[in-house]
Image: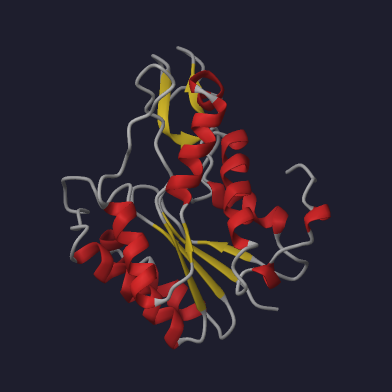
Amino acid sequence: MNQIYLIGDSTVTDNEPPFRGWGWALPQYVREGVTVHNHAESGRSTRSFLEEGLWAPVEAGLQPGDLLMIQFGHNDEKDDERHTDPDTTFPENLRFYCHAALEKGAQPVLLTPVSRRFFVGGGSMLYTHGEYPRAVRQTAAEDGIPLIDLKADSRELYLSLGEEKTAELFVRLKPGEHPDFPEGHDDKTHFNAYGAKMICALVVKEMRNIPACRPFLREEDGETGEL
């Protein structure tokens, strides 16, 4: 049975509670015999994921017929050694991963970076990630790679829920609740378990529209089990 490989950042990775990425919830949706190999790591960009050697085991493990899902952007936009340019190095790196997968006979899928939670009053939200979502969409279109526009889907979800309900998807800690955050924490990027499940459901809904992804997924009436 073919496998699913995930590469990306903290919004994808399994993480440690109370933080969860959407990749943590994906195994509940896959057919029996399919394993989800979540290689995403917190804080990584398309550049640092490669430079730190995190790509090497993924490339070594990919087999013909496997699925490679790629979601970066959160850290590519950072102004440090992880930075990539949305018009040059960012799409170049995305293409590197896609073409490497294709050479192994695997199917790459590109995802735009999931939206951050920045409401600005009146039920409206800021657009996050600048030009990076556009760069992902453009790369997918130019190279014929399947696309999941998670940026657009997550933004639509947040707007439909409203500011207070959307906040329930993210890690929020009261002072003294967690030793790492003695003064509390109100995260606008990272999901709790509930949020990870909600975002994963968006991903799976889009996967069902991609012919190469559908064989990996369970039937829809089998998706109601709790993690």
As rendered, which of 105 and 121 lies closer to the eye?
121
Q: Position of residue 81 (x, y in %)?
A: 17, 53
On screen, residue 201 above or below 181: below
Is residue 29 at least partly visible in the picture?
yes
- Vertical position of residue 96 compared to residue 40: above or below: below
Quadrant (top left, top right, bottom left, bottom right) of the N terminus: bottom right
In percent of the image, x 71 and y 64: which residue is there? 217
Query: Does residue 10 appear to the left or right of 177 in the view shown?
Result: left
Left or right: 194 in relation to 39? right
Foreground: 113 or 127? 127
Numbered circles on residues, count: 0
Going by the image, does 61 lie left or right of 115?
Answer: right
The quadrant holding residue 206 is: bottom right
- The quarter of the rendered structure image containing the C terminus is top right
Viewer-side residue, 138 vs 26: 138
Q: Residue at x 44, y 79 (%)?
A: 101
Q: Is residue 183 above or below residue 131?
A: above
Q: How is the image coloured?
A: secondary structure
**119 relative to 15 in the view: left or right:** left
Residue 108 image point, x, y percent: 47, 73
Whole-percent x, y for residue 73 in the image: 32, 52
Looking at the image, the residue that sits furthest to the right is 221
Residue drawn where x is 76% and y is 42% of the image: 226
Give the quadrant of residue 208.
bottom right
Residue 45 in sight here: no
